[in-house]
Amino acid sequence: MILDLVQGTDTIIETRLNDFDFESNKVSYFDKENILQSLSAKELEETLIDNMHEYQGLGLSANQIGINTRAFAMMHEGESMVMFNPKVIVVTDELAMMKEGCLTWYGLFPNIARPAGVSISWFDRDGEEYNGAFTELSARIILHEYDHLNGYTFFDRAKPYHMNQARKKRKIYMRKLKKKR
């Protein structure tokens, strides 16, 4: 099921999300017609992965498609995976600077310094707990999506200079895109 990406001005983007409730095994959300719907963990996993691929992202958190629950999809070593109720255990002291994009703000790629590695615990759709250590791009995706779950965006992480440079480049990119249409 493909859902619309929410706008960056939507309050859910800056909201700390609720834990996924494995006891009830469902999360509720309002669809386009403002009708209350619900998804099981399996359906949420499929929805997150399908939407991540549809919008050509490397990651996608539930709030980016209007669902208030702590879950995100990501690409790791060429495979899709979903983390439910993740908790960062520790991050490395070493930082890596890299351009970072976000499906919520199309075409905006600020340079952001993030830890080069992260250890994290999470649950899969069946409620099985996992622990893992991730580095490089996978660590960046996890930390970006984890920020979303806590109501933070890359605007909170980028230095003003890098965000201004990214906005200028986005403006040029969007003009070129309009001319092609």
Image: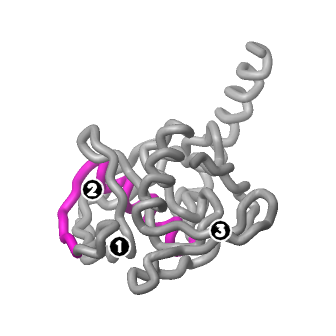
Give the spatial CA distance, label 2 vs label 3: 38 Å
Residue 159's place in the image compared with 84, above or below, is above
Q: Name the magenta segment's main secondary structure.
A: helix
Q: Quadrant of residue 35?
A: bottom right
Residue neighbourhood size for the residue with mark 3, other residues' Cα within 10 Å, grouped as few (<14), some (14–19), many (≥20):
few
Name the mark on residue 116: 2
Mark 1: which secondary structure?
strand
Could you tell me the amino acid type at mark 3? Gln
Mark 1 or 2: the one toward you: 1
Residue 133 lies within the magenta run: yes
Give the spatial CA distance, label 1 vs label 2: 18 Å
Tell me what residue is drawn at x 30 percent, y 51 percent.
Answer: 138
Nearer-the-camera pick, 71 or 29: 29
Name the mark on residue 86: 1
Residue 76 lies within the magenta run: no
Residue neighbourhood size for the residue with mark 1, other residues' Cα within 10 Å, grouped as few (<14), some (14–19), many (≥20):
many
Mark 3 or 1: the one toward you: 3
Q: Position of residue 159 (x, y in %)?
A: 55, 57
Mark 2 or 3: the one toward you: 3
Name the mark on residue 37: 3
Q: Quadrant of residue 13?
A: bottom right
Residue 81's place in the image compared with 20, above or below, is above
How does the figure colour the protein chain or chains? one colour
